[in-house]
Amino acid sequence: MPQYTLPPNNGLANLYGGAVMIWAAVFVVISVIIHVCFAIGVNRDAARREQHAQDTVFVGRLCWTFATLLGGPFMAGLYWVMHRSTLAPAPESPLRVICPICDTTQQFAPSAAGTVRECQTCRRPIHIPEADEPADGDGARRSSDSGEP
């Protein structure tokens, strides 16, 4: 049975091995920076959508952020297609509700209908009426209760 031996170490393998390790480390650092930048961008856009009473598709802001942190440009592209491209569904108009305590008009995402949320002005809980409940002349709905227990 023949015996195989490794070629003698002439120093080139050590030289190239070090360069490969350096380039691998540079690649990892650049990849992490790209993933973090895309995740920050997706998080800021999703936060802006929340401020304008628009929901994100499928999952919430933090889930999109972590998915983009792991998936990088691929997940950021998927987020863009689902929220910003012409393939994205048309945004629903926000629900406008008048707080019964401070009489200010609040805007909430359509998914908040039928829930109790906090007034952004007086911080008291207000009931968000269903979309089929009547609205006043300017399209705002009055909360049916004071939100107090």
Image (cartoon, rainbow, N blue to C red):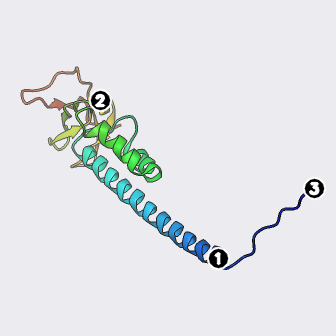
Nearer-N-terminus badge (2/1): 1
How far is the residue under mark 3 from the one under mark 1? 31 Å
Q: Which residue is mark 1?
A: 14
Left or right: 32 with respect to 41? right
Q: Is residue 129 shown above or below 41?
A: above
Please report whichever mark, 3 or 2, sits nearer to the chain's N-terminal start: 3
Amino acid at circle 3: Met
Q: Given contact means CB atoms under 8 Å apart, are the residues at marks 2 and 1 in contact? A: no
Secondary structure state at the residue bearing disc 1: helix
Residue on which the image places disc 3: 1
- In the picture, the quarter occupied by the C terminus is top left
* SS for dot 2: loop
In the rendered view of the protein, which quadrant contains the N terminus?
bottom right
Q: CA distance from mark 3 to mark 2?
A: 79 Å
Give the label, 2 or 1, closer to the camera.
1
Task: Check the image and report above or below for 12 versus 73.
Answer: below
Residue sticking out furthest to the bottom: 11
- The residue that disc 2 covers is 113
